[in-house]
RNA sequence: GGGCGGUUAGCUCAGUGGUAGAGCAUCGGCUUUACACGCCGGGUGUCGCAGGUUCGAGCCCUGCACCGCCCACCA
């Protein structure tokens, strides 16, 4: 055993209170969790820790999943791996912008100049103050720094064995440098490209969003049956085509009707024109296989753009663009007639459309319905339905599709290799792989990676401005990698003077920032020092473990695999451990928006960090787990029991000597099996099972084993018996403490410090061989003694409890013939623990044992 | 529509083809020299449903139902 024992020093009254503060201070002083980079890659276990979003406070879900990671980290550290366990803060992006806006009462206005003396008011004013982009970013940095301090305090209190010297922020310099350098390499390799195209767009945040950030929400809506006039024919029955739509307000954006090529009803119309109602615009009737004869009237209106199917039709049928919705969601002003939009009746179109100008989609819809009713083009009443509508996951209003210039990162051409990487990656639990494959197979287009926002990593790109003032997007100017990170809105490209910004023959900055996942997808590179510290990177990359929750498989996990493939042609990590959610007793995810959040700090203070960790570690990998303070209380009881049992074992630890008693030897043999199985299960990331089994063993150790040997260890049967018990107890205590150390780091460290030197968290993980060494190997006959004695003990306890008054004899049902032989070697311990005077095999029935109860004690 | 997971005691959940389990809750007993933040004990089950394989199924196979989640072009 590598652990060195020191003189035993026991507290009179052990307590859990204050252990978090005490040991956090000591661990920090001693550098217990400091990463030592001198080790080779094979001796290192590296973790790509999730950087929590710094936008308010951590919640119980964080505590849950980060505990899982910490258990693994502590296990691997005790197994002898040097653990690279950094912590990042995801302070980049929209959540921070929103929080800063609310916290300080400001809005970012990029057109304003920087004001170096700006200070936010004490309280956020009712009317938001407009500030420049640099001022806004200063406030973002200020608030995230405060939040990060609070987060670190909570993480330390919870007992995460992070090396707090290894922290990064996704808005920090290193992260920006990595993000920009990786982007420039993609650009150089043709994997990143720019395109002006219809893009999913949030009208409130006024930014493009990616497929990965979509979510469907069931919304009320209505089918509107609307008639289009056949061009050239008289406006009478039989000369109309009826379509159904949920978005009648987009009639002015209609560019065609479409039906299935085989649909007999509409086949005669293909190639002909129809006239839109109200706006009197001739549009062609087209055929496309995507049109579903079963839906609505079987013929649909194509608008630019009502949904993603419109985009497909528009592209594949080479249709024109008639966009009506602006980036802010309002209908834009349009001039009809000569020089403007085409119409058979420009005057009427103008009168109708002017009533929509500057309205939102919802208001415009009501207005159009009113106009259609007046014109008689609405057939019947709108038919209310609920249907799924695409939303930005952080947004409040449905997404629109707006044409804009955006940066894309290629994903479609990597699909096959990404599926292979998904096979190669070891998933815990295994079935989570399906979600990844589902997502990769469902990819609809390349990754739109630019955002029209402020607090993020800027694209490190400028564009030349021609003598006519036009921007040459096809030939972006890029900085040398050594200059990174840069902000193109303040930095000047090489070969240009600052005064040439936005001037003819000068340069213009790319105005966008990167999608937050374009930075987060590089966390292994950021944390591992990809560009800054190649030596470190070689020792930690590819990493061993990516822990994360299942809701961000399609975003964080997917994009990280993608970027590692594009840059390094390999997986970013060997394993991924997927955590479930914390759900309330109604099976609802606990989250801020649901209003069922519990403050983690209060829980940690009430139940102790070890108690809360016990609950968290009871949740199996990948499984949603019920929030359960009861389990935290159980965890706290376990921690308390550990203190007291250890005190008992250590309070009279001498004499010590050979472990000769069968009960002692049986206990250690069983413990060796537990150690062996626990090790294998933790290697397989099955932390919940190990906790469950170890704790079961420990309670039996306390309630059965310690009770059985108590009398002997006090010396009632001589020094040799006491020595055997004492020595066995210490071997068991040492191993059990270490098995529980990853789960209950505070109480195990406390107990360890009573009699061992050094931190238990740097002690060697127990082995079966180590536990068996003092008894010269596994002892199967002693195991039989242990089982028989425990069974008989349970019988005696039951019978004694049932019979309220003292009796002469009791008959047990632990009644196998082998019980007698099994019990005999431990009979002194057994009789002492049960207060039975003597043990005899009676002839009542050869399969039964009879005990004679002692007289009532005086 | 496709996929994944779940369904075991009042609650939360283990369960590895071989006599259905734990903790909590509940009830009863115990001031036993580590621990009353403790100890001992009791009651509580059509293992979602229906078939099949097997000497034997909570577990393996097939189908179904319900719950939850992921994905999907959702006029």
Image: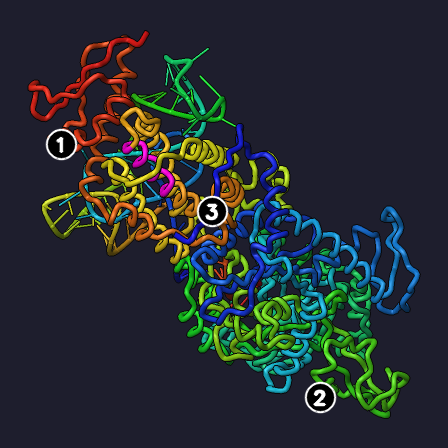
Residues packed near mark 2 inside 10 Å, few (<14), some (14 to 19) or many (20 plus): few
Residue displayed at 12% across by 23% down: A848
Secondary structure at numbered mark 2: loop
Calculate the distance from the C-alpha at mark 3 to the C-alpha at mark 1. Answer: 38 Å
CA distance for labels 3 and 2: 59 Å
Q: Earlier in the sequence, mark 1 or mark 2?
A: 2
Q: Residues within 10 Å of mark 3 (few under 14, many from 20)?
A: many
- In the rendered image, residue A379, in percent from the top left (x then y), is placed at 62, 58
* Location of mark 2 (residue): A474
Does A176 appear above or below A627? below
Q: Residue at x 47, y 47 (%)?
A: A741
Left or right relative to A324: residue A524:
left
Residue A456 in view here: yes
Q: Which residues are magenta?
A: A720-732
Q: Which of A564 and A271 lies nearest the eye of the viewer? A: A564
Q: Is residue A230 above or below residue A648?
A: below
- First-in-chain label (3 vs 1): 3
Q: Which residue is mark 3?
A: A741
Tell me the subunit letter for badge 3: A
The residue tagged 1 is A821
Q: Nearer the viewer, residue A746 or A68?
A: A746
The reply to whether the C-beta atoms of the residues labelled 1 and 2 are less than 8 Å apart is: no
């Amino acid at each position: 055993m590598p652990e060195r024992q020191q003189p035993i020093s026991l507290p009179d009254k052990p307590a859990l209170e204050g252990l978090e503060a005490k040991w956090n201070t000591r661990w920090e002083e001693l550098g217990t969790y400091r990463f030592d980079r001198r080790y080779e890659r094979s001796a290192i276990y590296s973790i790509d820790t999730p950087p929590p979003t710094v936008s308010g406070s951590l919640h119980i879900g964080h505590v849950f999943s980060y505990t899982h990671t910490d258990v693994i980290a502590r296990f691997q550290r005790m197994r002898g791996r040097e653990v690279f366990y950094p912590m990042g803060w995801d302070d980049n992006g929209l959540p921070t912008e929103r929080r800063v806006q609310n916290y300080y009462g400001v809005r970012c206005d990029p057109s304003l100049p920087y004001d170096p003396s700006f200070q936010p008011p004490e309280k956020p004013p009712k009317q938001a103050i407009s500030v420049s982009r640099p001022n806004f970013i200063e406030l973002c940095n200020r608030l995230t720094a405060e939040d990060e301090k609070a987060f670190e305090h909570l993480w330390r209190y919870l007992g995460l064995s992070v090396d707090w010297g290894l922290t990064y922020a996704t808005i920090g310099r290193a992260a920006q440098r990595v993000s920009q350098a990786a982007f420039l390499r993609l650009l150089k390799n043709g994997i990143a490209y720019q395109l002006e195209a219809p893009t999913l767009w949030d009208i409130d945040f006024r930014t493009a969003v990616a497929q990965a950030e979509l979510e469907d929400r069931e919304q009320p809506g209505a089918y509107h049956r609307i008639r289009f006039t056949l061009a050239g024919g008289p406006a009478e029955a039989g000369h109309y085509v009826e379509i159904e739509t949920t978005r009648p307000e987009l009639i002015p954006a209609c560019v065609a009707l479409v039906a299935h090529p085989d649909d007999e009803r509409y086949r005669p119309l293909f190639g002909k024109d129809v006239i839109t109602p109200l706006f009197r615009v001739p549009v062609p009737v087209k055929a496309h296989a995507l049109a579903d004869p079963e839906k609505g009237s079987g013929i649909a209106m194509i608008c630019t753009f009502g949904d993603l199917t419109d985009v497909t039709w528009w592209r594949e049928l080479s249709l024109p663009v008639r966009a009506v919705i602006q980036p802010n969601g309002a209908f834009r002003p349009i001039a009809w007639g000569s020089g403007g939009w085409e119409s058979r009746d420009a005057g009427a179109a103008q009168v109708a459309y002017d009533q929509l100008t500057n309205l939102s989609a919802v208001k415009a819809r009501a207005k159009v319905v009113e106009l259609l009713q007046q014109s008689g083009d609405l057939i019947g009443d709108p038919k209310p339905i609920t249907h799924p509508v695409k939303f930005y996951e952080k947004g409040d209003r449905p997404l629109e599709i707006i044409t804009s210039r955006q940066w894309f990162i290629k994903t479609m051409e990597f699909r096959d290799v990404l599926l292979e990487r998904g096979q190669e990656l070891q998933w815990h639990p295994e079935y989570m792989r399906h979600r990844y494959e589902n997502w990769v197979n469902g990819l609809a287009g390349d990754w739109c990676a630019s955002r029209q926002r402020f607090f993020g990593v800027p694209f490190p790109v400028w564009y030349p401005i021609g003598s006519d003032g036009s921007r040459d997007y096809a030939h972006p100017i890029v900085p040398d990698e050594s200059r990174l990170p840069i902000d193109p809105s303040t930095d000047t490209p090489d070969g240009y003077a600052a005064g040439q910004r936005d001037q003819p023959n000068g340069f213009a900055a790319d105005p966008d920032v990167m999608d937050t996942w374009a930075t987060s997808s590089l966390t292994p590179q950021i944390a591992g020092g990809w560009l800054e510290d190649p030596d470190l990177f070689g020792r930690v990359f590819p990493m061993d473990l990516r822990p994360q929750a299942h809701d961000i498989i399609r975003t964080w996990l997917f994009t990280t695999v993608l970027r590692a493939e594009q840059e390094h042609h390999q997986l970013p990590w060997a394993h991924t451990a997927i955590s479930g959610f914390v759900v309330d007793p109604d099976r609802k995810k606990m989250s801020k928006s649901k209003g069922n959040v519990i403050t983690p700090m209060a829980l940690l203070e009430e139940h102790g960090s070890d108690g809360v960790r016990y609950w968290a570690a009871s949740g199996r990998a990948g499984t949603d787990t019920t929030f359960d303070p009861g389990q935290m209380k159980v965890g706290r009881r376990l921690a308390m029991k550990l203190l007291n049992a250890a005190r008992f074992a250590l309070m009279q630890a001498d004499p010590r000597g050979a472990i000769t008693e069968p009960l002692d030897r049986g206990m250690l043999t069983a413990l060796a099996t537990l150690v062996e199985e626990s090790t294998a299960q933790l290697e397989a990331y099955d932390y919940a099972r190990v906790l469950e089994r170890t704790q079961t063993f420990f309670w039996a150790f306390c309630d059965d084993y310690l009770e059985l040997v108590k009398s002997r260890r006090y010396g009632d049967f001589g020094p040799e018996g006491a020595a055997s018990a004492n020595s066995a107890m210490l071997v068991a205590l040492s191993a059990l403490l270490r098995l529980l150390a990853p789960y209950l780091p505070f109480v195990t460290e406390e107990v360890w410090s009573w009699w061992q030197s050094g931190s238990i968290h740097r002690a060697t993980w127990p082995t079966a061989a180590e536990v068996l060494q003092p008894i010269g190997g596994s002892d199967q006959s002693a195991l039989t003694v242990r089982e028989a004695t425990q069974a008989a003990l349970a019988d005696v306890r039951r019978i004694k409890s049932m019979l309220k008054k003292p009796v002469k004899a009791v008959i047990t049902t632990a009644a196998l013939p082998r019980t007698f032989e099994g019990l005999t070697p431990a009979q002194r311990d057994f009789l002492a623990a049960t207060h039975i005077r003597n043990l005899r095999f009676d002839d009542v029935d050869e399969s039964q044992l009879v005990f004679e109860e002692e007289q009532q004690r005086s």
